């Protein structure tokens, strides 16, 4: 529809504003390097062993996880995919049949739409983006993961967030909102608002599988992505004190 086309055109016309921040360490450190210490805990809760895992340890633990019944029927656990130093973190619900086989999130039909959504933002899987799920094992029959299953998997999601330190988190659908923010309100009421998790801005949009069944809502998802991009840009260019 016209507003979508206009919005897209406007988005395409906007030049990419990225401050000249190098991801490499400066040649001369201005101060002595601080001693290595674990990333801060995500929430006010007791630390768990997962909070100290590095990527290979986390991947191994998730692959071998037996913390909830979803492990019984999975072919493999699906940790996530993408840039390990991302601006964006997209969080879906859980692996479906194809993801369970391939070991990568969002590789089926919903994944194709997610890739198109990323392309509309001029980003791509693996480049400035990491994609994860609220649960790492496929719920049988692709049902929505239960609260207890999402709670079992949450330490892994929190550890991913701590290691990735994304600048914005986009929650795809109700289950992801429930898993991260513990909010059960309707998605429609949560869109367009900025939430926070561990100091990172969080925005909410429809799950791509929902959008495949409700094509007119794609325009709303596009609005949400533009909102997420504005949020990201605010993070990257903080207001100057004058
Ligand atoms: N749906 C999800 O939420 N995640 C996937 O990885 C695939 C489909």
Image: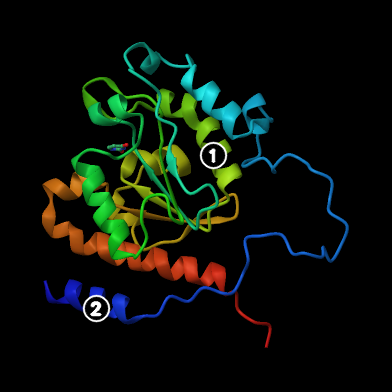
Give the left or right position of residue 151, taking residue 38 as reference: left
Q: Is mark 2 within 8 Å of ligand 1?
A: no
- Name the secondary structure under disc 2: helix
In the rendered image, the residue lying farthest to the right is 32
Q: Is mark 1 within 8 Å of ligand 1?
A: no
Tally of numbered tags:
2
In the rendered image, the residue lying farthest to the bottom is 242
Q: Residues within 10 Å of mark 2 (few under 14, many from 20)?
A: few
Estimate the x, y position of residue 45 in percent, counting from the top left. Answer: 65, 34
Q: Quadrant of residue 219?
A: bottom left
Q: Residues within 10 Å of mark 1 (few under 14, many from 20)?
A: many
Estimate the x, y position of residue 128 in percent, counting from the top left. Answer: 46, 56
Residue nearer the viewer, 189 or 50: 50
Q: Quadrant of residue 43?
A: top right
Residue 203 vs 241, above or below: the answer is above
Estimate the x, y position of residue 30 in percent, counting from the top left. Answer: 84, 66
Residue at 22% across / 43% down in the picture? Answer: 110
| Residue at image mark 1 | 160
In the rendered image, the residue lying farthest to the front is 27
Estimate the x, y position of residue 184 in percent, counting from the top left. Answer: 36, 42
Q: Which mark is residue 9?
A: 2
Give the left or right position of residue 239, taking residue 109 as reference: right
- Name the secondary structure under disc 1: helix
Residue nearer the viewer, 151 or 135: 135
Q: Quadrant of residue 2?
A: bottom left
The residues tagged by marks 1 and 2 sit, at their Cα atoms, a distance apart of: 34 Å
Give the left or right position of residue 36, taking residue 5 as reference: right
The tag earlier along the polypeptide, 1 or 2, is 2
Tell me, yes or no, whether the two marked residues, 1 and 2, touch with CB atoms within 8 Å. no
Residue 182 visible within the image: no
Location of the N terminus by quadrant is bottom left
């Amino acid at each position: 529809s016209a507003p979508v086309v206009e919005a897209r055109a406007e988005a395409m016309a906007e030049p990419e504003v990225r401050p000249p921040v190098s991801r490499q360490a400066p040649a001369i450190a201005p101060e002595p390097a601080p001693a290595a210490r674990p990333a801060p805990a995500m929430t006010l809760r007791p630390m768990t062993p997962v909070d100290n895992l590095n990527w290979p340890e986390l991947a191994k633990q998730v692959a071998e996880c037996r913390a909830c019944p979803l492990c019984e029927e999975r072919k493999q656990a699906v940790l996530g995919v993408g840039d390990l130093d991302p601006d964006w973190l997209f969080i879906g619900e859980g692996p479906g049949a194809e993801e369970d086989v391939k070991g990568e999130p969002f590789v089926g039909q919903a994944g194709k739409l997610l890739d198109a959504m990323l392309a509309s933002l001029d980003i791509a899987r693996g480049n400035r983006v990491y994609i994860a799920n609220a649960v790492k094992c496929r719920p049988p029959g692709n049902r929505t993961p239960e609260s207890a299953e999402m709670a079992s998997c949450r330490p892994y999601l929190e550890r991913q967030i701590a290691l990735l330190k994304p600048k914005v988190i986009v929650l795809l659908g109700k289950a992801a909102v429930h898993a991260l923010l513990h909010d059960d309100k309707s998605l429609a009421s949560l869109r367009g608002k900025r939430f926070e998790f561990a100091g990172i801005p969080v925005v909410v949009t429809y799950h791509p599988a929902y959008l495949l069944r409700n094509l007119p809502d794609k325009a709303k998802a596009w609005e949400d992505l533009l909102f997420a991009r504005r949020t990201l840009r605010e993070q990257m260019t903080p207001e100057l004190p004058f």
